[in-house]
Amino acid sequence: MDNFWRVVGVLLLGWVAWDLYAGYTLLHDVIYKETDPTLYWTGVSIWLALAISCFFSWGGDLLEED
């Protein structure tokens, strides 16, 4: 299951890269950087935070004993 979240994280990082390239992001609507930069950067920051969080395990299997 850990690999699944890493794949999701990579896909979300790709989403962020596309948002930066294209100049718009998707939240509840299409947000363009030129028309609403504050909401645009907030949306990109949210996607980036979600992407980064996928690489950290918050699960309960900290130590495995033999």
Image (cartoon, helix red, strand yellow):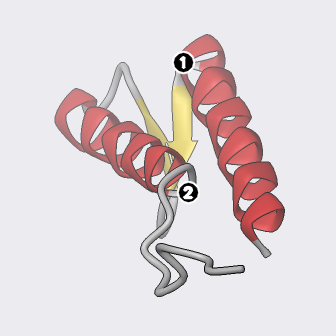
The local secondary structure at tag 1 comes to helix
- Type of amino acid at the residue the image marks with label 2: Cys
Q: Which residue is mark 2?
A: 54
Front-most of residues 63 and 32: 63
Q: Which residue is mark 1?
A: 20
- How far is the residue under mark 1 from the one under mark 2? 20 Å
Q: Position of residue 61 (x, y in %)?
A: 54, 82
- Which label belongs to residue 64? none
Q: Position of residue 48 (x, y in %)?
A: 44, 40
Residue in view at x 54 percent, y 18 percent: 20
Quarter of the image that includes the N terminus: bottom right
Q: Position of residue 11 (x, y in %)?
A: 77, 44
Residue in view at x 63 percent, y 34 percent: 13
Quarter of the image that includes the C terminus: bottom right
**Considering only order in the chain, which callout, 2 or 1, is on the residue closer to the N terminus?**
1
Residue situated furthest bottom in the rendering? 60
Residue 38 higher or lower than 18, as above or below = below
Residue in view at x 47 percent, y 48 percent: 47
Q: Nearer the viewer, mark 1 or mark 2?
A: 2
